[in-house]
Image (cartoon, rainbow, N blue to C red):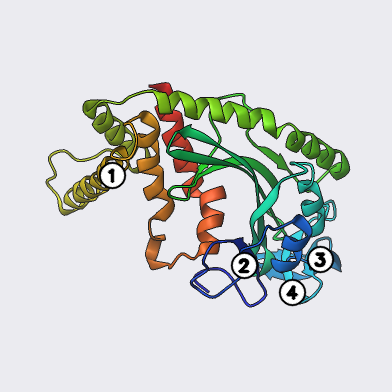
Amino acid sequence: MAHEMTENDGAVYHKTKAWHGLGNVVDYTLSLSTALEQSGLGWGVEKSEGINVISDNMLYTNEYRGIVRKDTQEVLGIVSPQYQVVQNDEVFRLAEYFSNVATVESAGSIQGGRKCYLLLNQDSFEATADDVVERYMALFWGHDGKSSIVLKPTSIRVVCKNTMDMALAEGTKNKMTIKHHGDISTKMQEAKDILAEYKNTGNLFRNQVSVLARRPISHDALRRFFFDVYQTMEGEIPTRPVTPEEERAHTKAVATIGKWDSTFEQESGLMPASWWLAVNAVTKDLQHRPAARGRQATVSTKAYSNLNGKGSKDSTRVMQHALTL
């Protein structure tokens, strides 16, 4: 299915309308235990015995193992004997170390359970008097044999619900990846420590946002920022297009930057014009643009992409660029 949610997937969203009809939408506060149940992630996986199968044009002999979803008996991935399984409920228990007051914003799976995610909500702060920023922790894992466990702080701006990756400074503990090999118990304990320290890294993000929110931005600086960011993500803009391809590239650039400029003008009418508004004018578009190649994005796939895909990476670039100016 285009939205990558199959009949064997589930999801739960806190106060987010799922117009496609998939997943549960709830108004009440979601605890970890409730979210595990409501998201449909209560199933487990196990490693099979030796497997003989052709996958991705490769022949896997019986030295390999299949990752089998217990409730459907579907093979989600093929792994080596050294692969260490981590269950969905283990990740949810890991999330308990994030905060004893954290609640769940969303949780679910796509691709039949091959990829899973959990978004935890801790608290919020004001970038300006009219701009509230939420602090979140995203956890990603999967059972496709390729996905590591990833812990990543993020920020979702309440005004427009756009997600930004908190990759703000080189050397910052902004992300942790746990591979399914070696001493998995020690790695999980390290992850608990990272989650417990999140409050400090969250404060760093608050400080960076405050810096950008206090810095006024001129019209010329805004245009240059939009121009530079666009070229960083999409390539050089043809200023004097000659070929049809150059004309299309130029038209796309003008339309995109015009959209960013319009968003900035709308929001600067409500609060002081700042570099923070400039960043959000871009990231709002990044998180809400249609999926590529005609694929229709849904709440679930947008959430996953914005937190762990191209939307997240591009948003990080935008934030980092603003902080260097």
Looking at marks 3 and 2 on the same chain, the residue that comes earlier in the sequence is marked by 3
Horizontal relation, residue 271 to residue 9: left or right = left
Q: Nearer the viewer, mark 1 or mark 3?
A: 1
Identify the mark at residue 287; answer none if there is no mark.
none
Residue type marked 1:
Gln
Disc 3 from disc 4: Cα separation: 12 Å
| Residue situated in front as seen by the camera: 71 or 218 | 218
Q: Nearer the viewer, mark 1 or mark 4?
A: 1
Identify the mark at residue 266; answer none if there is no mark.
1
Q: Nearer the viewer, mark 4 or mark 2?
A: 2
| Image location (x, y in percent) of residue 298 | 49, 66
Horizontal relation, residue 277 to residue 6: left or right = left
Categorize mark 1 by other alpha carbons within 10 Å: few (<14), some (14-19), many (20+).
few
Looking at marks 4 and 2 on the same chain, the residue that comes earlier in the sequence is marked by 4
Looking at marks 1 and 4 on the same chain, the residue that comes earlier in the sequence is marked by 4
Residue 296: image quadrant is bottom left
Looking at marks 1 and 3 on the same chain, the residue that comes earlier in the sequence is marked by 3
Residue 171: image quadrant is top right
Residue to which mark 2 is pinned? 111
Horizontal relation, residue 23 to residue 176: left or right = left
Disc 1 from disc 2: Cα separation: 38 Å
Residue type marked 3:
Gly
Disc 3 from disc 2: Cα separation: 15 Å
Residue to which mark 4 is pinned? 74
